[in-house]
Image (spheres, rainbow, N blue to C red):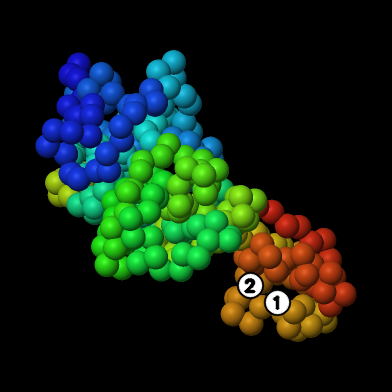
């Protein structure tokens, strides 16, 4: 048994990372984790926090079942070739770059924030409220006159995104007092800060705090990333690609459903005319030669409108069923 080598603090020889003046107790002490010294394993980081449950559910549909252990940052998994850790997404890109973690899932925002040198394996577009990117925005009070980076010259900006904010200001030819905040930045405007840089999915929190978006710095989705050196190992590269394939298949399946039905041969042309033109359903003969079975995959958003139309076109015994994975 050997300790996992790594950094316990953003200092040392790690890649650039935004200063975080206070440790809230959630920072993972990776050097305290003891793992088996087994070359035929891949070390995977799952994002802790808002995307945790969604990510674990996605992996479950992909065929990987995780169980939290007594140590909150260690996950048991029913794949003996995987060692899984639960880590804040803000830290995952740094640990992957340093080689402490082989592969992990973190947002594009945190990869850019840390300017991490990692290999992107795949893009996984999912969020708390749906399958779309989140936006990293600069926001000010609705009544404020600020419109550009230059307008914020010398002002105070609260954010978790220290690096992204400073680079945005620099691009706009401005400097400001960029203050690190542990979240809930919106409540600080206008009494404690002139502006905030936050992530938003729907904009509801910004509206609730009477904030207005000045600019969008970037759009972000979760990415599966890998350590460059680890992925040069043939076994780890293939394992990472296999995990990515299954997770992407599960993500794609989340927006699709299967639909099967029985159709009289005399109604087949009418039923096929209702199905989307780009779909090629499977048509199989039944014991009764005057009937066939039709099966297809449809967008989840389409099926509620199609089923009544298919019924009217002559389809019978319609069965809709969920999918776990859809892989090209």
Give the secondary structure at mark 2: loop
Q: Nearer the viewer, residue 103 or 172?
A: 172
In the structure shown, which secondary structural element does the residue marked by tag 1 occupy?
loop
- Give me the residue at 25% from left, 18% from top: 32
Task: Determine whether label 1 and label 2 are within 8 Å by CB.
Answer: yes
Q: Residue at x 31, y 68 (%)?
A: 172
Q: Considering depth in this image, is 167 or 16 the residue closer to the camera? A: 167
Tell me if mark 1 has few (under 14), some (14-19) or many (20+) residues whose alpha carbon lies within 10 angstroms of its own. some
Determine the CA span between mark 1 and mark 2.
9 Å
Q: Report the residue marked by disc 1.
A: 275
Choose the circle earlier in sequence order: 1 or 2: 1
Residue 207, horizontal then vertical, whole percent:
63, 56
Check the picture and name the quadrant holding the N terminus: top left
Q: Quadrant location of residue 270?
A: bottom right
79 with respect to 210 (left or right): left
Q: Residues within 10 Å of mark 2 (few under 14, many from 20)?
A: some
Relative to 320, 72 lies left or right:
left
| Residue carrying label 2 | 281
The answer to which of 102 and 206 lies nearer the viewer is 206
Image point 40% across, 46% down: which residue?
159
Left or right: 123, with 288 as reference point: left
Q: Is residue 202 left or right of residue 196?
A: right
Mark 1 or 2: the one toward you:
1
The answer, for residue 25, to whether it is visible in the render is: yes
Residue 325 in percent (x, y) is at 52, 53
Residue 304's place in the image compared with 324, above or below, is below
**Spot occupied by residue 182 in the image (x, y as percentages of width and height):** 43, 37
Q: Point out which mark residue 53 bears.
A: none
Q: Is residue 171 above or below residue 31?
A: below
């Amino acid at each position: 048994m050997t300790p996992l080598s790594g950094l316990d603090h953003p200092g040392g020889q790690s890649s650039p990372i935004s200063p975080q003046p206070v440790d809230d107790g959630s920072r993972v002490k990776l050097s305290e984790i003891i793992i088996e010294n087994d070359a035929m394993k891949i070390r995977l980081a799952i994002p802790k926090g808002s995307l945790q449950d969604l990510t674990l559910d996605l992996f479950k549909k992909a065929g990987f079942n995780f169980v939290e252990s007594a140590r909150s940052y260690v996950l048991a998994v029913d794949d003996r070739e995987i060692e899984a850790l639960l880590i804040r997404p803000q830290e995952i890109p740094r640990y992957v770059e340093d080689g402490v973690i082989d592969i992990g899932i973190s947002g594009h925002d945190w990869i850019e924030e840390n300017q991490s040198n990692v290999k992107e394996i795949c893009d996984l577009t999912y969020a708390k409220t749906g399958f779309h990117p989140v936006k990293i925005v600069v926001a000010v009070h609705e009544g404020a006159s600020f419109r550009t980076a230059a307008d914020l010259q010398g002002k105070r900006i609260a954010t978790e995104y220290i690096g992204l904010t400073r680079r945005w200001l620099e691009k706009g030819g401005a400097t400001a007092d960029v203050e690190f905040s542990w979240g809930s930045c919106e409540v600080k405007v206008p009494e404690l800060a002139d502006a905030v840089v936050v992530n938003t999915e729907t904009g509801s929190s910004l509206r609730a705090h009477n904030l207005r978006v000045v600019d969008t710095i970037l759009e972000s989705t979760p990415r599966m990333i890998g350590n460059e050196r680890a992925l040069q190992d043939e076994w780890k590269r293939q394992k990472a690609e296999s995990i990515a394939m299954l997770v992407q298949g599960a993500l794609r399946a989340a927006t699709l459903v299967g639909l099967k039905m029985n159709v009289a041969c005399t109604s087949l042309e009418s039923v096929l005319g209702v199905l989307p033109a780009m779909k090629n359903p499977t048509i199989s003969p039944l014991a009764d030669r005057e009937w066939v079975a039709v099966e297809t995959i449809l967008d989840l958003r389409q099926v509620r409108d199609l089923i009544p139309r298919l019924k009217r076109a002559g389809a019978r015994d319609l069965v809709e069923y969920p999918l776990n994975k859809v892989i090209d």
